[in-house]
Image: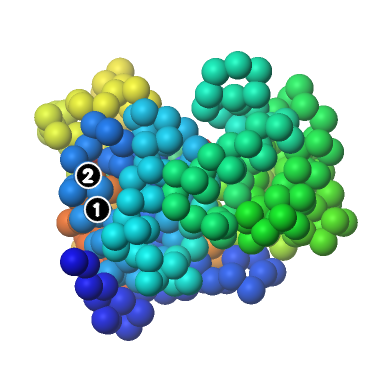
Amino acid sequence: MYQANPARYTSGMKYRRTGRSGVLLPALSLGFWHNFGDVTPEEQSRAIARAAFDAGITHFDLANNYGPAPGAAEARLGRMMADDFRSHRDELFIATKAAYDMWEGPYGSWASRKHLMASLDQSLRRMNLDYVDLFYCHRYDPQTPLEETLQALVDIVRSGKALYVGLSRWPLEAARTGYAYLAAHDVPCLIYQGRLNLFDQAPKTEGTLQAATAAGAGFISFSPLAQGLLTDRYLNGIPADSRMAHDPRFLKAETLTPQLLGRIRRLNDLAAQRGEPLATMALSWILHHTEVTSVIIGASSPQQIQRNLACLESPPFTAEELQTITEILNT
Ligand SMILES: NC(=O)c1ccc[n+]([C@@H]2O[C@H](COP(=O)([O-])OP(=O)(O)OC[C@H]3O[C@@H](n4cnc5c(N)ncnc54)[C@H](OP(=O)(O)O)[C@@H]3O)[C@@H](O)[C@H]2O)c1
């Protein structure tokens, strides 16, 4: 029987306001993309989720297709909601998404009203929930009229099946159209989800970070550790228990070129000079952007979550350190 840590809100977690909304999110959120599917022992997933909640991580990020198999992560959360978190439902901010491939046939993917509505109904059943706090359109669909997708999001909020909606991986102009449409229909976009980390600064250079802020939406960063590359994991080879070794669907060994490894080593040295592990510095670098509401970390153990909390106490970056980072990333 799980007993939540009574000190979960007094042990250091920081909460940040999401854009111009009433919602506070923890600076660190927990993602269910990996380590919550059928290939991970259920007790391991449960220990990770409990460690997160015990540390004040009140935001869980899911999607219809997280697994393997697609749907497995939501089903796992559903069992945890029944066993561990039922009495904590109102302390949790639970997100799910739709628009990537989920089921066979013409309605199992992309961002039609049909797909989004049917997928959310499936997600609620799997997660054992009456509503989600946040529902995202997971990707931009160039074939479906934006108005159809956006009106579906509006209607989903009106139906009470989601409290808020968000956009993920939408290109800049489509996102701007989305913010305007949603605001005009009194369902302002809560948050934009994009990949911002030391190795991928596209949201800054392409402007999706600034556009979210201008629209009053928050910004949440996924894969803040570049799936583990921005840690000490791969400094001396590819450990057997790492994501690259045992689940190379999205993180392939070819990624780890000598040039990339050189950058990781130099970033690791800089982190050591700051007196912290590379993972801590990488998370802290994202959070030093005031437009960022939260980073969604993945974890394969409760210990990784505990270690990553250190970024909340990380010192600010000096101008010299930021300059060194730029130089390292340009080598
Ligand atoms: N919107 C989207 O399209 C989208 C796309 C991708 C992800 N996401 C969301 O973002 C979440 C996070 O993505 P992610 O899992 O790629 O995040 P990440 O934080 O970049 O990578 C997590 C992985 O890094 C390693 N790690 C974590 N802390 C560590 C530490 N202190 N020391 C050494 N290694 C450490 C672990 O890998 P090992 O397994 O090697 O231990 C862990 O599984 C997902 O779960 C999902 O919710 C959204």
Above or below, 203 against 106 in this view is below
Which residue sits at x=53%, y=62%?
A: 293
Residue 148 marker: none
Which residue sits at x=32%, y=83%?
A: 10
Label pair 2/1, CB-CB below 8 angstroms: yes
- Which image quarter is the C terminus in? top left
x and y percentages locating residue 181 in the rendered image = 84, 49
64 with respect to 156 (left or right): left
81 with respect to 188 (left or right): left
Neighbour class for label 2 at 10 Å: few (<14), some, many (≥20)?
some
Element assignment for label 2:
helix
Q: Front-most of 184 and 288?
A: 184
Q: Front-most of 291 and 146?
A: 146
x and y percentages locating residue 160 in the rendered image = 67, 59
* Residue where numbered disc 2 is placed: 42
- Which image quarter is the N terminus in? bottom left
Which residue sits at x=56%, y=29%?
A: 100
* Amino acid bearing label 2: Glu
Residue 221 appearing in the image: no
* Amino acid bearing label 1: Arg
x and y percentages locating residue 253 in the rendered image = 27, 21
Which residue sits at x=58%, y=43%?
A: 121
The quarter of the picture showing ligand 1: top left
